Amino acid sequence: MHKRSEINELLMESACSHSADPNKKACNKMTPGATTGGCAFEGAQISLFPYADAAHLVHGPITCLGSSWETRATCTSVDGLDFTQMGFTTAISTTDVVFSGEQKLWDAIQYIMEHYSPNALFVYATCVTALIGDDIDTVCNKAQERYQLPVVAVHAPGFLGGKNLGSRLAGETVLKKLIGTAEPDSIPQFPINLIGDYNVTGDMWQYSHLLDELGITILSTLSGDGRVSKIRTAHRAKLNVIVCAKSLISLPRKMEQKYGMPYISVSFYGMRDTSDAIRQIAISFGDAELLQRTEQLIKREESALLEKLRPYRQLFVGKKAVINTGGNKSWSIAAALQDLGIEVVATSVKKATADDSEKARQYLGPDGILITNPGAEQAKIIDEKKADILLAGGRSLYTAIKKGICFIDVNQEKKKSYGAYNGLLTLAEDIKNSLENPVFRCVGKEAPWNK
Amino acid sequence: MEQVTTAARKPLQVNPFKLSQPMGATLAWLGVNRCMPLMHGALGCASFTKVFYTRHFCEPIAIQTTAVDDITAVLDGGDYSIAEAITNICKKVTPALIGLNSTGLTETKGDDLCRVTQQIDIPLVYANTPDYEGGLESGWALTAKALIEQLVSAQSTTVAKKMVLLPHVSLQPIEVEKIKDFLGDFGFEVYAIPDLSTSLDGYLGEKQGALSGGGIEVDDIRTLADAAWVMSVGESMLKCATALQAKNPNMQHLHFDHLNGLHATDALVEKLLAIGLVSQPPAKVVRWRQRLQDALIDSHFSLGQTKITVALEPDHGIGIVQALQEAGARCSGFISSVKAQHLATMENVTPLVGDMEDMEALHPTTDLFISNFHAERIAHRHGKALMLRGFPNWEQVGNTLKNDVLYEGSCYLLFESANLATEQRAKADH
């Protein structure tokens, strides 16, 4: 279990940008009736479920897992049974609520060990089992002893807070229970940990082969294409690389304190950011030869990409886009669009941190509009700036249709990867298809009875 | 008659397809026009549900949360978080109704919704839906019952041609519409409660997502009790019919376990003709029955050599299985999400309350699986055909317009399953 003081510390994470802003008290304040976004359990689940050699058992009523398993396309290279796309839950009943669910939990653990032989097991507390006081730690410890495998209790019940907090609690659990509990067979020359890339739609694989080519070894991940056996050796890496994920900032900060391991924060979205990310990783090792190899690789990849992008960039000349999304997407998508030669005239910063807003300003320049109230402003900005494309969530579809402009659902990236160099090509192709698609004009056509 | 066995020997669910009562409740609230579903629980209860349905329906889903945290979980009896949530909702929108339902968290801590909501002066209905009891069907039914009990005014006279339709949760929006139209063709003026046919049917509207965008009007719910007839579809809806009849002792009740296939639709038509608002069946109904007869003949060759295994909600599965059995399909397995009385009445079927691990175990005797999208990996792994039904289907678009009911929909159901089975056999031969 986590102490209240630990939870507060994670909420007030000093390395997070809100800490500099006295008006923002914590990363996730929850207002009844005016809150969207997932709970702490979901955050923990997002961060740990990609461990493919571990089974994940959710100790709670059916909603927690029943609505959420197999929702994220987190790719793995695992042979055989892929635990990331399986769901295990104790699905507790009234009897368990009244008489405790500990025995059921123990039986469920036994069932999983005997039927599925995972390399490790994560057991997630949820609101109800936390409230009725099931002693999950004791059950997990007993199981760990009996099966001689890591059996890790994850205490991030939903009512503790939002997704970010849950991700941090997951990071904290990994740090306390797994990192440093095993040694790697050998320590490569340039070992790194990738933190916060969950390999959704294979995002990580868009750049991992490039790191590999440079001789940079991904020793472990939290947790894209992840293995528990590898994260246990994470303390032997020489650099933590945080990929587009503020939520996990506490972990690398604490690993720096504990193991003296430096960390950098990068984004693999768009050409410039991808090149910069690879360069930053190489620079961190301070090896002249590595740096030279890296610059050559970047040059090669960029010129190959620009060659392939040429026809797209011609097509996109003079096109203007408005972006309405949140978090780091407010600037990372902007950067990617600019790489394609599209002018980004406005981006929404309503759901972005101070850091994200600042970055968005850098990318958009002084004339770019940072939208603070997209609901009211979006349509007006499209008119004023004569935008051609709206990138937003499904709710904004009608705005695009009314304005007769092309609409791209920003959540498409949950279906295919727009990451790194190759992902930018995929994005270009999708934007081209959208621009050429007559559907938006067709749908927006006046009904015969209104003529 | 077979004994209903349960999977109680297992202390867990592996690859569950069971869904929770709060999720069923949400869907029911969304069948009331301009309603704001309010989930009394932690953030995740509402957000998981929202994402789940947004992906299934490809539509924005209105829902809010009381955002219970670890402090209010202990110190608040719901008074603060519910009142605060409603105040904040009403700052932005003017709902015709707040649909408040509890979750496992708030039932465990024992919040008394009845007491708390007495202090709230805007239209509100509450339902107790812990997620450690029941499932999707009962959550939907409890909510429909709450709407009836808390909104409908008691009456003693009836309007002869007015009928209330109580559809079970798995009927897709177009199916509810088809049933309403069908009853309309027999002379009835029909109100469905809840009514997804005009809210989650997937239509392009101007205002999206702030409140439910369609469904039965709150005012129409208030006056439902003068209906001469109430018709429940699905065993889970029986207690809603009883609740409505309690509002008017002169209301008569029709019940059907499902409306899939020739037998079930014939049984409905027989009743409707007996009531006698029309003397002859409508011509298009006669025509569709002939088409269904033909569809049964055309599909029987494929289905007659097909063994099916379904993993669905009980009210849904019983209809699908019995419709396909009419064309000779053999049911190797019926995995139900929860226990249900009428499972025991099924012929040539051994139902089991379980999960997709249980479903997968039946693959040696299965040609065609019928379940939600989680079954895809399983069907693929064993080279079996899969017909996607039930929640969720995140792989395909057009879920809301899938019609399996009455003479017409049954034709589509037979053809789709027969073709899928044939296709799979062709693949296996190569």
Image: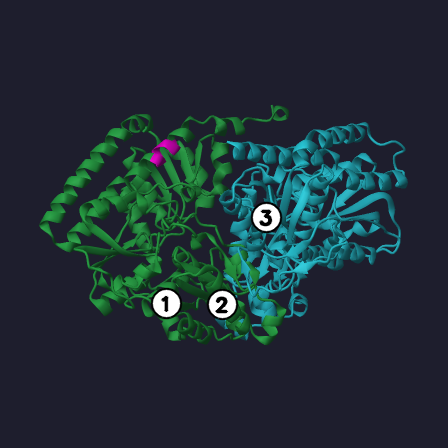
Chain colours: A green, B cyan
Quarter of the image for residue A56 reads: bottom left
Horizontal and vertical percent position of residue B175: 69, 40
For badge 3, the amino acid type reads Phe
* Secondary structure of residue under mark 2: helix
Q: Quadrant of the C terminus of chain A?
A: top right
Q: Residue at x 71, y 30 (%)?
A: B295
Quarter of the image for residue A232 reads: bottom left
Give the number of the disc on residue A200: none
Q: Earlier in the sequence, mark 2 or mark 1?
A: 2
For badge 2, the amino acid type reads Gln
User: Which residue, given by chain and number where applicable, does mark 3 sit on?
Assistant: B391
* Secondary structure of residue under mark 1: helix
Q: Quadrant of the N terminus of chain A?
A: bottom left
Inspect this view and state whether residue A248 appears.
yes
How far apart marks 1 and 3 lie (CA) works out to 33 Å
Asked if the residues shown at circle 2 and circle 1 are in contact, with their CB atoms under 8 angstroms apart, the answer is no
User: Which residue, given by chain and number where applicable, does mark 2 sit on?
Assistant: A110
Asked if the residues shown at circle 1 and circle 3 are in contact, with their CB atoms under 8 angstroms apart, the answer is no
In which chain is the residue bearing label 3? Answer: B
Mark 1 crowdedness (10 Å alpha carbons): few <14, some 14-19, many ≥20: many
Image position of A143 (left or right of A217): right
Horizontal and vertical percent position of residue B27: 62, 51
Q: How many marks?
A: 3
Give the number of the disc on residue A173: 1
* Secondary structure of residue under mark 3: loop
Q: Which residues are magenta?
A: A426-431
